[in-house]
Image (cartoon, helix red, strand yellow):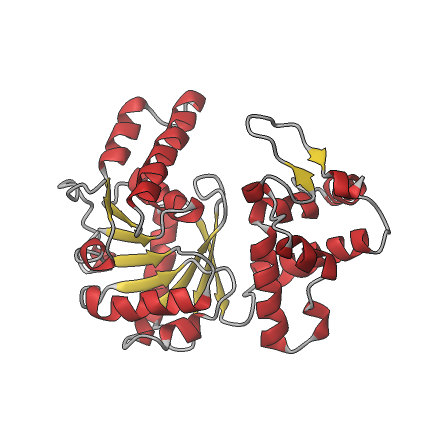
Amino acid sequence: MNNAPNNSETKNPLLGGRGAISVIGAGTMGNGIAHVFAQSGFAVTLIDVSAIQLEKAVATISKNFDRQVAKGTITEAAKALAMANISTETTIAAGVKNAGLVIEAATENTELKLNIFKQLDSAAPEGCILASNTSSISITKIAAATKWPERVIGMHFMNPVPVMQLVEIINGYATSKEVTETIITLSKQLGKVPCLVNDYPGFIANRILMPMINEAIISLYEGVAGVEEIDTIMKLGMAHPMGPLQLADFIGLDVCLSILKVLQDGFGNPKYAPCPLLVNMVMAGKLGVKSGEGFYIYAAGSKELLVSARFK
């Protein structure tokens, strides 16, 4: 689905007069990021090598807007305007040619991200800011793959993007002050709350979250308590909206494992070593919501939370 960019794009002086946003990756995070920028009046180009994935992403964005309409938070007219701001492309070169900001939201894979940023070196316009939605991979390492490391920054949105207010802004070693200030201001324009952190393994969100999730899995692995008990204690006792095991399923156990490995490798500290149970579940393909089973079972069309038979 390739559409011409919308002529009503916002001209944002913070982006050198270009208000166009390019988002690379049409998965859950990519379509969420495209959603919030389009709703805020920006022309957005969503880029993915798969035309089928792009069609699914646009359909998902439309359904998510429908939920907002049903709740009365936006009007049908506002939805129509936002959807008209979204175009799609299957190549990076075509998708970023008018961008003032490119946000990479591809799979959490280091080599894939480095390859994308190498391509952006020649494809992105001069002065374009290059951001990554990575949740754990070093922004300094990503920036080193480009000729313009001062223009590279982390822009870590939370899932689901249209709902969650936080954007974790990560400065790489060479990120310029001007770029940082621009991204903080843009985040506020989206109605988000930006929090600035420096580039160390796991940043802040996952440096704190993942050890907690890992400790919950270790507690289950050692037989200290069951799945429901662990999650209930954290929900009712610590006022968490979701227990750590359910949250791990929601994030994806493969993603949790990947982030823990980044922490373990980055700090060289055994306290970040992933629980053997987590490793085995990932090897067995029990990845949580995305695979239909993790610590809980996820049946299509059902909202009932059922503990996996493995843990009963």
> Percent x, y for residue 183?
35, 59
Vertical comparison of 256 with 226: above or below: below
Which quadrant is home to the N terminus? top left
> Percent x, y for residue 286?
63, 48
Left or right of 241, for residue 100: left
Q: Nearer the viewer, residue 202 or 25?
A: 25
Which quadrant is home to the C terminus? top right
Q: Quadrant of residue 236?
A: top right
Measuring 57% from the left and 50% from the top, which residue is drawn there?
252
**Extreme residue toward the front, this view:** 284
For residue 246, say whether it is visible. Answer: yes
Vertical comparison of 245 with 123: above or below: above
**Extreme residue toward the right, this view:** 224
Left or right of 5, for residue 308: right
Vertical comparison of 300 with 40: above or below: above
Measuring 43% from the left and 40% from the top, which residue is drawn there?
162
> Percent x, y for residue 259?
57, 63
> Percent x, y for residue 88?
24, 45
Measuring 18% from the left and 44% from the top, which residue is drawn there?
9
